[in-house]
Amino acid sequence: MNDSGAGPARRKHAEHVMGTVVSFDVPARAGEPRGDGPLGRAVRWLHWVDATFSPYRDDSDVSQFGRGARPLAQCAPELAEVLEACAAISARSGGYFTTTPGGSFDPSGYVKGWAIERAAAILTAAGSAEHSVNGGGDVQCTGERVWRVGIADPLRPGRLALVVTGQDFAVATSGVAERGAHIIDPYTGQPPAGLASLTVVGARLAETDAYATAAFAMGSGARDWLEGLDGFEAFAITAAGATWQTSGFARYAG
Amino acid sequence: MRRVILAVTGTIAGLVALLSFKSHVPSSPVAATAGGPGSGSSSASSPSSASTSPPRGGGQTEAVPGAFPQGSLAGTLPAGETAVNGKVASTSYGPVQIQLIERSGKIVKVAVLVQPLNTLNDIQIGKFAFPKLISETLTAQDAKIDAVSGATYTSAGYVQSLQSALDKQH
């Protein structure tokens, strides 16, 4: 029943949602993005997440909960799940991951990766054996084939810095390349100095992406912290163009 | 064809970034920019000409000498080679369009169809940056990637991302 990744029966789809574009690489029989098949279910999930968790929509649970207008019990149960996960990651990162990056409640730093990971799980549950879902540069790959994920070079746009390979894995990159300095060190209120981009590789995207965000905010402290995380490896490019990687990263190097 | 499209987009994305960067650092020698950060200023252009700022929009259209073909190669190709034109990309310095020559699924040559020629800086970009970016294009096509991870792009930024080029493959 496995789909052949190299075969022609693949389907690409790019969905504009959550302020970015989510790119799907799925088996052709995953159906249409507006259909009832696996792809349609995953796409509908992402739009539901957008409507429920967007801090830019006044009627979203996140907006209403954030200003105290809607108690947690009246929000979607997934919000409590997200809050619990965010609290654990915040503690594990010494506060560098936060749900109030700009002062007001905004769990987007976790929600996007979590939503992509869940979209990939929805595809699996609906019968797709091999797929990748890329949410604006953070990727969840599913299936036994070896996936090749290029890491964009933050200093030379349009080029790749390297390629990582793996099976059933997630790749998340934080950096300044595409949106300017949007990650703030919560302890200084300033963009972290020193890193141009930081890539974390792990099994599942929700945690992997959140750790990439937290570590990027740490700046020069990121390397030691990442070295101590079990199940995650990292690769960084400094603003000066130098690179470093955690001790186990080499097994992902393509 | 997939890799050809990927290369077209990648090269244009690089050019757009390069041209944007130039607008912030007008006196930086072009050769240093093309070599990327940390490459030093192995300037082949004279500092005096690099810092000259002739007025924009002068409509100067003289041919630029360089190590890469100017203008379409479509009429001169041997059997087995095909020309693929990229879309015209708008940059802050004007339109840019490149042409890739493909043989058996590989890019073998790159030509520049349209590039900004309005200022001396633009001419230097054409002379030094284009060949650099073209050589990078010829390297990137061998990467055979499934997806691209990078700092989060917006809906608008997606258009020029390498991922968008991958998504066009069906």
Image (tube, rainbow, N blue to C red):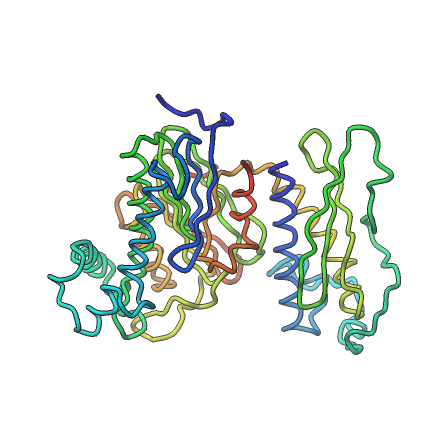
A239 or B143, which is in the foreground? Answer: B143
Q: Position of residue A248 (x, y in %)?
A: 36, 41
Q: Which residue is farthest top?
A: A1
Query: In the image shown, does A5 or A94 lie closer to the viewer?
Result: A5
Residue at the (64%, 59%) spot, across then down: B39
Would you identify the image quadrant in which residue B61 lies? Answer: bottom right
Q: What is the quadrant of the N terminus of chain A in the image?
A: top left
Judge left or right: residue A230 versus residue B155. left
Q: Could you tell me residue A172's position as x and y percent?
A: 39, 50
Looking at the rendering, which quadrant does residue A192 occupy? bottom left
The residue at 36%/69% (across/down) is: A184
Q: Position of residue A169 (x, y in %)?
A: 35, 39
* Residue A161 seen by the camera: yes
Q: Position of residue B125 (x, y in %)?
A: 74, 62
Looking at the image, residue B122 sits to the left or right of residue A178; the answer is right
Q: Which is more toward the observer, B160 or A163? A: B160
Q: Residue furthest left?
A: A73
Q: Is residue A227 visible?
A: no
**Residue at the image point whose x is 43% and y is 42% from the top:** A24
The answer to whether A127 is drawn above or below residue A250 in the figure is above
